[in-house]
Image (cartoon, rainbow, N blue to C red):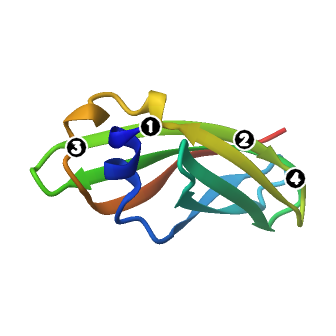
Amino acid sequence: MKTALRLLAALVAVAVLGCGASGLGLQNRVEVRCVGAGIGYQCSLQHTAGPDPVRACWTVSVTCANGTRTSGSGCGEVQVGATSTVLVPLSDFAGAEACDLATGVTVAVDSVTPL
């Protein structure tokens, strides 16, 4: 539990935009926002543009005061114009036990693929 509190301590919210081409050549866009949720990072996916439901994958990266860096990844599906949520559990963050206090968190969308 101590590791969870240290890893989540500094997180407020993070948002990024990911894009992927549809079969029609149009861009599907997904916004991913992640917030600390005690047992991990609760990430919401919002489909903001494009004609297709999509599967998006992303990486949450945490920087700690002592210089430790750790990251965890998640994937989820979202329908056109909808929002869905996915938990990235702390157990997915390799080396999290070495983090003394989270000082920075970023989210990078790795892929957006039409379903």
According to the picture, the residue beneath numbered tag 1 turns out to be 72
Q: Earlier along the polypeptide chain: callout 4 or callout 1?
A: 4
Q: Callout 3 environment at 10 Å: few (<14), some (14 to 19), or many (20+)?
A: many
**Label ID, residue 99:** 3
Q: How far apart are marks 2 and 1 (CA)?
A: 14 Å
Q: Which of marks 4 and 1 is in front?
A: 1
Mark 3 residue type: Cys
Q: Which of marks 2 and 1 is in front?
A: 1
Q: How far apart are marks 4 and 3 (CA)?
A: 39 Å
Q: Earlier along the polypeptide chain: callout 3 or callout 2?
A: 2
Assign a secondary structure to mark 2. strand
**Label ID, residue 76:** 2
Q: Residue at x 57, y 53 (%)?
A: 37
Q: Earlier along the polypeptide chain: callout 4 or callout 2?
A: 4
According to the picture, the residue beneath numbered tag 4 turns out to be 52
Q: Which of marks 3 and 2 is in front?
A: 3
Q: Residue at x 54, y 42 (%)?
A: 39
Mark 4 residue type: Asp
Q: Count the marks.
A: 4
- Front residue of 90/86: it is 90
Mark 2 residue type: Gly
**Are the residues at dot 4 and dot 1 in contact (C-beta closer than 8 Å)?**
no
Q: In which quarter of the image is residue 45?
A: bottom right
Q: How far apart are marks 3 and 2 (CA)?
A: 27 Å
Q: Earlier along the polypeptide chain: callout 3 or callout 1?
A: 1
Q: Is residue 76 visible?
A: yes
Q: From the image, which quarter does the N terminus lie in? A: top left
Assign a secondary structure to mark 4. loop
